[in-house]
Image (cartoon, rainbow, N blue to C red):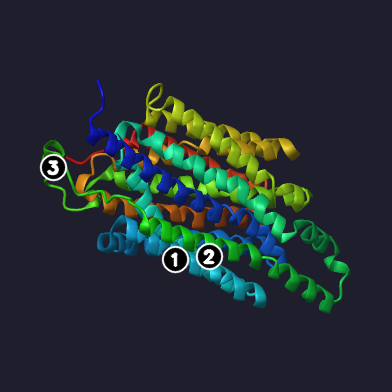
Amino acid sequence: MAKSVKEEKANGSTTRSIIIIGALFFIFGFVTWLNSLLIPYLEIACELTKFQSFFVTFAFYIAYVVMAPISTRTLNKLGFKKGMSVALVIMAFGALLFIPAAITRTYLLFLTGLFIMGSGLAILQTASNPYVTIVGPAESAAKRISIMGICNKLAGAIAPILIGFFLQLEKADELQSDVANLTTAERINELNEMALRVIPPYIGIIIVLLLLALWVYKSSLPEIDTDEEDDTLSSTNASKKSVFDFPHVVLGVITLFIYVGAEVIAVDTIISYGDSLGIPLTTAKYFVTGTMVSMVVGYIIGIVSIPKYIKQENALRVSAVLGILFSIIAIFTEGYVSLAFIALLGLANSLMWPAIWPLALADVGRFTKAASSLLVMGIAGGAIIPLAYGALAENWNPQEAYWVLIPCYLFILYFAVSGYKIRRA
Protein backbone atom coordinates (compact mmCIF):
# COMPACT_ATOMS: atom_id res chain seq x y z
CA MET A 1 0.00 0.00 0.00
CA ALA A 2 1.38 3.40 -0.95
CA LYS A 3 2.17 5.80 1.84
CA SER A 4 0.00 8.88 2.19
CA VAL A 5 1.43 12.36 1.77
CA LYS A 6 0.94 12.88 5.50
CA GLU A 7 2.95 9.73 6.33
CA GLU A 8 5.75 10.74 3.96
CA LYS A 9 5.95 14.18 5.54
CA ALA A 10 6.03 12.60 9.01
CA ASN A 11 8.82 10.23 7.95
CA GLY A 12 10.75 13.11 6.40
CA SER A 13 10.38 15.15 9.58
CA THR A 14 11.57 12.22 11.68
CA THR A 15 14.61 11.71 9.42
CA ARG A 16 15.55 15.40 9.62
CA SER A 17 15.15 15.31 13.38
CA ILE A 18 17.41 12.26 13.67
CA ILE A 19 20.08 13.95 11.50
CA ILE A 20 20.07 17.05 13.72
CA ILE A 21 20.14 15.01 16.95
CA GLY A 22 22.89 12.86 15.40
CA ALA A 23 24.99 16.00 14.91
CA LEU A 24 24.42 16.89 18.55
CA PHE A 25 25.50 13.42 19.66
CA PHE A 26 28.66 13.82 17.57
CA ILE A 27 29.43 17.00 19.52
CA PHE A 28 28.66 15.19 22.82
CA GLY A 29 31.24 12.58 21.90
CA PHE A 30 33.92 14.95 20.67
CA VAL A 31 33.80 17.16 23.75
CA THR A 32 33.22 14.40 26.31
CA TRP A 33 35.88 11.92 25.24
CA LEU A 34 38.57 14.58 24.96
CA ASN A 35 38.80 14.17 28.73
CA SER A 36 40.75 10.94 28.19
CA LEU A 37 43.52 13.03 26.66
CA LEU A 38 43.18 15.99 29.00
CA ILE A 39 43.73 13.84 32.11
CA PRO A 40 47.36 12.82 31.38
CA TYR A 41 48.08 16.06 29.48
CA LEU A 42 47.02 18.38 32.30
CA GLU A 43 48.69 16.05 34.81
CA ILE A 44 51.97 17.01 33.16
CA ALA A 45 51.22 20.63 32.24
CA CYS A 46 49.75 21.58 35.65
CA GLU A 47 52.05 19.29 37.70
CA LEU A 48 49.29 17.21 39.26
CA THR A 49 49.13 13.92 41.13
CA LYS A 50 47.21 11.11 39.42
CA PHE A 51 44.29 11.58 41.85
CA GLN A 52 44.18 15.34 41.17
CA SER A 53 44.16 14.74 37.41
CA PHE A 54 40.87 12.80 37.69
CA PHE A 55 39.12 15.97 38.84
CA VAL A 56 38.87 16.57 35.07
CA THR A 57 36.07 13.99 34.98
CA PHE A 58 34.65 15.18 38.32
CA ALA A 59 34.27 18.81 37.19
CA PHE A 60 32.76 17.75 33.86
CA TYR A 61 30.23 15.21 35.13
CA ILE A 62 29.22 16.78 38.45
CA ALA A 63 27.58 19.52 36.34
CA TYR A 64 24.86 17.00 35.47
CA VAL A 65 23.71 16.89 39.11
CA VAL A 66 23.79 20.66 39.53
CA MET A 67 22.11 21.38 36.20
CA ALA A 68 19.46 18.65 35.97
CA PRO A 69 16.65 20.64 37.69
CA ILE A 70 17.64 23.77 35.75
CA SER A 71 17.64 21.71 32.54
CA THR A 72 14.02 20.71 33.03
CA ARG A 73 12.92 24.29 33.71
CA THR A 74 14.91 25.51 30.71
CA LEU A 75 13.23 23.03 28.38
CA ASN A 76 9.78 23.70 29.82
CA LYS A 77 10.27 27.42 29.23
CA LEU A 78 12.11 27.41 25.88
CA GLY A 79 11.13 24.08 24.36
CA PHE A 80 13.51 21.51 22.89
CA LYS A 81 14.89 23.48 19.95
CA LYS A 82 15.67 26.80 21.65
CA GLY A 83 16.87 24.97 24.75
CA MET A 84 19.40 23.00 22.70
CA SER A 85 20.66 26.20 21.03
CA VAL A 86 21.16 27.90 24.40
CA ALA A 87 22.98 24.81 25.70
CA LEU A 88 25.43 24.89 22.79
CA VAL A 89 26.20 28.56 23.48
CA ILE A 90 26.85 27.69 27.15
CA MET A 91 29.28 24.99 26.05
CA ALA A 92 31.08 27.48 23.80
CA PHE A 93 31.54 29.80 26.78
CA GLY A 94 33.04 26.94 28.80
CA ALA A 95 35.47 26.18 25.98
CA LEU A 96 36.37 29.88 25.88
CA LEU A 97 37.69 29.65 29.46
CA PHE A 98 40.39 27.26 28.25
CA ILE A 99 42.16 30.25 26.71
CA PRO A 100 42.87 32.17 29.97
CA ALA A 101 43.36 28.81 31.74
CA ALA A 102 46.12 27.88 29.29
CA ILE A 103 47.72 31.34 29.37
CA THR A 104 47.94 31.29 33.18
CA ARG A 105 48.34 27.50 33.49
CA THR A 106 45.61 27.51 36.15
CA TYR A 107 44.10 24.07 36.77
CA LEU A 108 41.07 25.50 38.61
CA LEU A 109 40.19 27.59 35.56
CA PHE A 110 40.43 24.50 33.33
CA LEU A 111 38.06 22.74 35.73
CA THR A 112 35.66 25.71 35.67
CA GLY A 113 35.58 25.58 31.88
CA LEU A 114 34.91 21.84 31.99
CA PHE A 115 32.10 22.35 34.52
CA ILE A 116 30.42 24.96 32.27
CA MET A 117 30.76 22.69 29.24
CA GLY A 118 29.23 19.87 31.27
CA SER A 119 26.39 22.21 32.26
CA GLY A 120 25.56 22.87 28.62
CA LEU A 121 25.73 19.16 27.89
CA ALA A 122 23.32 18.46 30.76
CA ILE A 123 20.66 20.56 29.00
CA LEU A 124 21.40 18.91 25.66
CA GLN A 125 21.23 15.42 27.15
CA THR A 126 17.97 16.17 28.98
CA ALA A 127 16.44 17.17 25.65
CA SER A 128 18.02 14.82 23.14
CA ASN A 129 17.76 11.42 24.86
CA PRO A 130 14.00 11.43 25.50
CA TYR A 131 13.57 13.08 22.08
CA VAL A 132 15.18 10.10 20.34
CA THR A 133 13.23 7.70 22.58
CA ILE A 134 9.85 9.30 21.80
CA VAL A 135 10.32 10.25 18.12
CA GLY A 136 9.55 6.69 16.95
CA PRO A 137 8.15 3.33 18.16
CA ALA A 138 9.09 2.47 21.77
CA GLU A 139 10.21 -1.09 20.91
CA SER A 140 12.90 0.22 18.55
CA ALA A 141 14.11 3.06 20.80
CA ALA A 142 17.36 1.24 21.58
CA LYS A 143 18.03 0.96 17.83
CA ARG A 144 17.64 4.74 17.35
CA ILE A 145 19.79 5.48 20.39
CA SER A 146 22.38 3.05 18.98
CA ILE A 147 22.52 5.17 15.81
CA MET A 148 23.10 8.21 18.01
CA GLY A 149 25.76 6.24 19.85
CA ILE A 150 27.66 5.62 16.62
CA CYS A 151 27.74 9.39 16.01
CA ASN A 152 28.92 9.89 19.60
CA LYS A 153 31.65 7.26 19.57
CA LEU A 154 32.97 8.05 16.10
CA ALA A 155 33.56 11.57 17.41
CA GLY A 156 35.21 10.05 20.48
CA ALA A 157 37.49 7.99 18.25
CA ILE A 158 38.51 11.02 16.21
CA ALA A 159 38.90 13.55 19.05
CA PRO A 160 42.06 12.25 20.84
CA ILE A 161 43.89 11.71 17.55
CA LEU A 162 42.92 15.08 16.06
CA ILE A 163 43.48 17.12 19.21
CA GLY A 164 46.56 15.06 20.04
CA PHE A 165 48.07 16.32 16.79
CA PHE A 166 47.62 19.94 17.90
CA LEU A 167 48.93 19.20 21.40
CA GLN A 168 52.16 17.74 19.95
CA LEU A 169 52.24 14.77 22.32
CA GLU A 170 55.75 13.77 21.30
CA LYS A 171 56.95 16.94 23.07
CA ALA A 172 54.89 16.01 26.13
CA ASP A 173 56.63 12.61 26.21
CA GLU A 174 60.04 14.28 25.93
CA LEU A 175 59.20 16.75 28.69
CA GLN A 176 57.95 13.98 30.97
CA SER A 177 61.23 12.08 30.60
CA ASP A 178 63.55 15.13 30.80
CA VAL A 179 61.81 17.18 33.51
CA ALA A 180 64.23 16.03 36.22
CA ASN A 181 67.17 17.41 34.25
CA LEU A 182 65.69 20.90 33.71
CA THR A 183 66.30 23.97 35.84
CA THR A 184 63.27 25.52 37.53
CA ALA A 185 63.11 28.31 34.94
CA GLU A 186 63.42 25.87 32.02
CA ARG A 187 60.74 23.59 33.50
CA ILE A 188 58.27 26.45 33.98
CA ASN A 189 58.93 27.72 30.46
CA GLU A 190 58.37 24.27 28.94
CA LEU A 191 55.18 23.70 30.94
CA ASN A 192 53.82 27.12 29.96
CA GLU A 193 54.48 26.35 26.31
CA MET A 194 52.80 22.97 26.69
CA ALA A 195 49.66 24.52 28.22
CA LEU A 196 49.38 27.11 25.42
CA ARG A 197 49.07 24.33 22.83
CA VAL A 198 45.53 23.71 24.13
CA ILE A 199 44.30 27.08 22.76
CA PRO A 200 44.10 26.52 18.94
CA PRO A 201 41.96 23.35 19.05
CA TYR A 202 39.59 24.86 21.59
CA ILE A 203 39.12 27.95 19.44
CA GLY A 204 38.02 25.52 16.72
CA ILE A 205 35.62 23.84 19.15
CA ILE A 206 34.10 27.23 20.08
CA ILE A 207 33.46 28.07 16.42
CA VAL A 208 31.84 24.69 15.73
CA LEU A 209 29.60 24.94 18.81
CA LEU A 210 28.35 28.40 17.84
CA LEU A 211 27.67 27.37 14.24
CA LEU A 212 25.78 24.29 15.45
CA ALA A 213 23.74 26.45 17.85
CA LEU A 214 22.70 28.66 14.93
CA TRP A 215 21.85 25.63 12.77
CA VAL A 216 19.63 24.08 15.47
CA TYR A 217 17.91 27.42 16.14
CA LYS A 218 17.13 27.90 12.42
CA SER A 219 16.16 24.26 11.84
CA SER A 220 12.69 22.76 11.44
CA LEU A 221 13.19 20.51 14.47
CA PRO A 222 9.64 19.83 15.71
CA GLU A 223 8.52 20.05 19.31
CA ILE A 224 7.26 16.85 20.93
CA ASP A 225 4.56 16.86 23.59
CA THR A 226 5.94 14.56 26.29
CA ASP A 227 2.89 15.20 28.48
CA GLU A 228 0.53 13.27 26.19
CA GLU A 229 -0.76 9.91 27.48
CA ASP A 230 -3.12 7.42 25.89
CA ASP A 231 -6.24 6.44 27.83
CA THR A 232 -4.76 3.24 29.25
CA LEU A 233 -1.57 4.91 30.45
CA SER A 234 -3.50 7.89 31.80
CA SER A 235 -5.67 5.53 33.86
CA THR A 236 -2.62 3.58 35.12
CA ASN A 237 -0.79 6.76 36.14
CA ALA A 238 -3.82 8.54 37.60
CA SER A 239 -2.65 7.99 41.18
CA LYS A 240 0.95 8.99 40.46
CA LYS A 241 1.92 12.32 42.02
CA SER A 242 5.59 12.52 41.04
CA VAL A 243 8.30 10.69 39.15
CA PHE A 244 9.38 9.08 42.44
CA ASP A 245 6.21 6.97 42.29
CA PHE A 246 7.96 4.93 39.60
CA PRO A 247 10.54 2.61 41.29
CA HIS A 248 11.91 1.46 37.93
CA VAL A 249 12.82 5.08 37.13
CA VAL A 250 14.72 5.48 40.41
CA LEU A 251 16.54 2.18 39.83
CA GLY A 252 17.21 3.33 36.26
CA VAL A 253 18.87 6.49 37.57
CA ILE A 254 21.12 4.44 39.88
CA THR A 255 21.93 2.06 37.02
CA LEU A 256 22.76 4.94 34.69
CA PHE A 257 24.94 6.51 37.42
CA ILE A 258 26.91 3.29 37.75
CA TYR A 259 27.06 2.63 34.01
CA VAL A 260 28.39 6.10 33.15
CA GLY A 261 31.02 5.78 35.87
CA ALA A 262 32.11 2.42 34.45
CA GLU A 263 32.18 3.72 30.89
CA VAL A 264 34.18 6.81 31.82
CA ILE A 265 36.71 4.61 33.63
CA ALA A 266 37.02 2.36 30.57
CA VAL A 267 37.56 5.30 28.20
CA ASP A 268 39.21 8.05 30.23
CA THR A 269 41.73 5.90 32.11
CA ILE A 270 43.11 3.86 29.22
CA ILE A 271 45.66 6.47 28.07
CA SER A 272 46.81 7.05 31.65
CA TYR A 273 46.94 3.27 32.22
CA GLY A 274 49.06 2.82 29.10
CA ASP A 275 51.34 5.63 30.30
CA SER A 276 51.77 3.82 33.64
CA LEU A 277 52.99 0.79 31.67
CA GLY A 278 55.68 2.94 30.05
CA ILE A 279 53.91 3.37 26.71
CA PRO A 280 54.50 6.86 25.17
CA LEU A 281 51.52 9.25 24.95
CA THR A 282 52.03 9.40 21.17
CA THR A 283 51.10 5.71 21.07
CA ALA A 284 48.65 5.67 24.00
CA LYS A 285 46.41 8.31 22.38
CA TYR A 286 45.22 5.62 19.94
CA PHE A 287 43.90 3.37 22.73
CA VAL A 288 40.75 5.48 23.11
CA THR A 289 40.10 4.96 19.40
CA GLY A 290 40.21 1.21 20.02
CA THR A 291 37.62 1.56 22.78
CA MET A 292 35.39 3.70 20.58
CA VAL A 293 35.67 1.34 17.63
CA SER A 294 34.60 -1.57 19.84
CA MET A 295 31.62 0.53 21.00
CA VAL A 296 30.66 1.32 17.40
CA VAL A 297 30.76 -2.42 16.63
CA GLY A 298 28.40 -2.96 19.56
CA TYR A 299 26.07 -0.25 18.33
CA ILE A 300 25.95 -1.80 14.86
CA ILE A 301 25.07 -5.13 16.46
CA GLY A 302 22.30 -3.33 18.34
CA ILE A 303 20.93 -1.65 15.22
CA VAL A 304 20.78 -4.98 13.38
CA SER A 305 19.48 -7.14 16.24
CA ILE A 306 17.18 -4.92 18.39
CA PRO A 307 14.28 -5.65 18.60
CA LYS A 308 14.19 -8.18 15.73
CA TYR A 309 16.44 -10.80 17.32
CA ILE A 310 16.96 -9.66 20.91
CA LYS A 311 14.96 -7.57 23.35
CA GLN A 312 16.44 -4.42 24.91
CA GLU A 313 16.53 -5.97 28.39
CA ASN A 314 18.31 -9.10 27.12
CA ALA A 315 20.91 -6.98 25.34
CA LEU A 316 21.56 -5.22 28.66
CA ARG A 317 22.00 -8.57 30.44
CA VAL A 318 24.55 -9.79 27.89
CA SER A 319 26.39 -6.46 28.09
CA ALA A 320 26.67 -6.64 31.89
CA VAL A 321 28.03 -10.19 31.79
CA LEU A 322 30.62 -9.17 29.16
CA GLY A 323 31.62 -6.21 31.35
CA ILE A 324 32.34 -8.52 34.29
CA LEU A 325 34.26 -11.00 32.11
CA PHE A 326 36.41 -8.40 30.30
CA SER A 327 37.24 -6.55 33.53
CA ILE A 328 38.49 -9.72 35.21
CA ILE A 329 40.62 -10.65 32.19
CA ALA A 330 42.10 -7.12 32.08
CA ILE A 331 43.05 -7.37 35.77
CA PHE A 332 44.72 -10.77 35.48
CA THR A 333 46.63 -10.29 32.22
CA GLU A 334 49.54 -8.00 31.39
CA GLY A 335 50.70 -5.33 28.94
CA TYR A 336 48.90 -4.92 25.63
CA VAL A 337 46.58 -7.87 26.34
CA SER A 338 45.29 -6.14 29.47
CA LEU A 339 44.93 -2.88 27.55
CA ALA A 340 43.04 -4.69 24.78
CA PHE A 341 40.42 -5.94 27.24
CA ILE A 342 40.00 -2.47 28.73
CA ALA A 343 39.37 -1.30 25.14
CA LEU A 344 36.93 -4.21 24.64
CA LEU A 345 34.88 -2.87 27.54
CA GLY A 346 33.63 -0.49 24.86
CA LEU A 347 31.83 -3.47 23.30
CA ALA A 348 30.35 -4.45 26.66
CA ASN A 349 29.25 -0.87 27.39
CA SER A 350 27.88 -0.07 23.94
CA LEU A 351 24.29 -1.25 24.38
CA MET A 352 23.89 -0.19 28.02
CA TRP A 353 22.97 3.44 27.41
CA PRO A 354 20.54 2.58 24.56
CA ALA A 355 18.82 -0.05 26.72
CA ILE A 356 18.72 1.73 30.09
CA TRP A 357 16.94 4.86 28.78
CA PRO A 358 13.86 3.18 27.24
CA LEU A 359 13.58 0.66 30.08
CA ALA A 360 13.69 3.45 32.67
CA LEU A 361 11.29 5.74 30.75
CA ALA A 362 8.72 3.02 30.04
CA ASP A 363 5.14 3.95 31.02
CA VAL A 364 6.00 7.27 32.71
CA GLY A 365 3.81 9.33 30.37
CA ARG A 366 3.45 12.93 31.55
CA PHE A 367 6.42 12.48 33.89
CA THR A 368 8.83 11.97 30.96
CA LYS A 369 10.66 15.31 31.31
CA ALA A 370 11.04 14.88 35.07
CA ALA A 371 12.23 11.29 34.64
CA SER A 372 14.66 12.40 31.95
CA SER A 373 16.14 15.09 34.19
CA LEU A 374 16.68 12.48 36.92
CA LEU A 375 18.34 10.14 34.44
CA VAL A 376 20.60 12.97 33.31
CA MET A 377 21.58 13.47 36.96
CA GLY A 378 22.71 9.86 36.85
CA ILE A 379 25.42 10.90 34.38
CA ALA A 380 27.19 12.33 37.44
CA GLY A 381 28.45 8.78 37.96
CA GLY A 382 31.18 9.91 35.61
CA ALA A 383 32.25 12.39 38.30
CA ILE A 384 32.29 10.09 41.33
CA ILE A 385 33.26 6.57 40.28
CA PRO A 386 36.41 7.55 38.29
CA LEU A 387 37.64 9.38 41.40
CA ALA A 388 37.40 6.07 43.24
CA TYR A 389 39.49 4.53 40.47
CA GLY A 390 41.99 7.41 40.71
CA ALA A 391 42.37 6.96 44.46
CA LEU A 392 42.88 3.21 44.09
CA ALA A 393 45.33 3.71 41.21
CA GLU A 394 47.42 6.09 43.28
CA ASN A 395 47.38 4.08 46.51
CA TRP A 396 47.31 0.60 45.00
CA ASN A 397 48.15 0.42 41.27
CA PRO A 398 46.35 1.41 38.03
CA GLN A 399 45.64 -2.20 37.00
CA GLU A 400 44.27 -3.51 40.30
CA ALA A 401 42.12 -0.36 40.55
CA TYR A 402 39.90 -1.82 37.81
CA TRP A 403 38.32 -4.05 40.48
CA VAL A 404 36.00 -1.08 41.05
CA LEU A 405 34.20 -2.09 37.82
CA ILE A 406 32.97 -5.50 39.05
CA PRO A 407 30.26 -4.30 41.48
CA CYS A 408 29.20 -1.74 38.87
CA TYR A 409 28.45 -4.39 36.26
CA LEU A 410 26.76 -6.64 38.85
CA PHE A 411 24.23 -3.90 39.68
CA ILE A 412 23.59 -3.26 35.99
CA LEU A 413 22.90 -6.99 35.61
CA TYR A 414 20.37 -6.79 38.48
CA PHE A 415 18.50 -3.93 36.77
CA ALA A 416 18.46 -5.85 33.48
CA VAL A 417 17.12 -9.02 35.11
CA SER A 418 14.48 -7.65 37.47
CA GLY A 419 14.96 -3.99 38.45
CA TYR A 420 13.32 -2.53 35.35
CA LYS A 421 10.13 -4.56 36.01
CA ILE A 422 9.38 -3.05 39.41
CA ARG A 423 6.20 -0.94 39.37
CA ARG A 424 4.15 0.53 42.20
CA ALA A 425 0.41 -0.15 42.08
Horizontally, is 185 left or right of 144 in the view?
A: right
Horizontally, is 85 left or right of 322 in the view?
A: left
**Helix, strand or loop under label 1:** helix
Mark 1–mark 2 CB contact (< 8 Å): no
Q: Which mark is residue 276?
A: none
Per the image, the residue denoted by label 1 is 89
Mark 3–mark 1 CB contact (< 8 Å): no
Q: Position of residue 410 (x, y in %)?
A: 47, 38
Q: Amino acid at mark 3?
A: Ser
Q: Quadrant of residue 108?
A: bottom right
Q: Distance between the Cα atoms at labels 2 and 3? A: 41 Å
- Which marked residue is nearer to the observer: mark 1 or mark 2? 1
How many marks are shown on the rendered structure? 3
Q: Distance between the Cα atoms at labels 3 and 1? A: 37 Å
Quarter containing the N terminus? top left
410 in relation to 51, above or below: above
Per the image, the residue denoted by label 3 is 234
Q: Position of residue 310 (x, y in %)?
A: 40, 24
Tell which circle, 2 or 3, labels the residue nearer the N-terminal end. 2
Horizontally, is 275 left or right of 407 in the view?
A: right
Q: Quadrant of residue 16?
A: top left
Disc 1 residue crowd, few under 14, some 14–19, many 20+, Cα 10 Å:
many
Disc 3 residue crowd, few under 14, some 14–19, many 20+, Cα 10 Å:
some
Per the image, the residue denoted by label 2 is 114
**Helix, strand or loop under label 2:** helix
